[in-house]
Image (cartoon, rainbow, N blue to C red):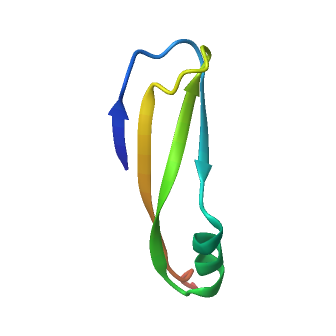
Amino acid sequence: MNIRYVSLLEGDLEATASVDVADRQRMQQDERGDTVVSVVLTDSAGSHPVDCRMEWAWIPKQKG
C-alpha cells in the first residue's frame, strides 16, 4: 500500500475503494493475479487529505 498525506485531516474519515470493470472480470475469471486498487479518503470537511493506492493479489484458496 502506498499512502501520501496531502494535508491535515479534519474529523472523521471515510474510505472508498474501487476496482474497474475489467479488473473485476479478471478477478472472477483468473485463478490468480493482481491489480492496483485506488482508495479515496474523504474527511469531514469534504477534502481528500490522503492519496492511497494498494496492490491487491489473489490466489486460489488452499484446502485443508
Instruction: Tell me residue 58's x, y (percent).
Output: 50, 74
Q: Which sits in the foreground, 64 or 14? A: 14
Quadrant position of residue 61? bottom right
Q: Which sits in the foreground, 37 or 47? A: 47
13, above or below 22, in the image = above
Residue, x 60% and y 53% (percent of image)? 18
In the shown orientation, is residue 39 left or right of residue 24? left
Residue, x 59% and y 80% (percent of image)? 26
Q: Quadrant of the C terminus?
A: bottom right
Figure label count: 0
Residue, x 61% and y 74% (percent of image)? 22
Instruction: Tell me residue 50's x, y (percent).
Output: 43, 31
Instruction: Tell me residue 57's x, y (percent).
Output: 45, 70
Q: Which sits in the foreground, 58 or 17? A: 17
Residue, x 43% and y 53% (percent of image)? 54
Quadrant position of residue 28? bottom right
Instruction: Tell me residue 62's x, y (percent).
Output: 54, 83
41, above or below 20, in the image = above
In the shown orientation, is residue 6 left or right of residue 59? left
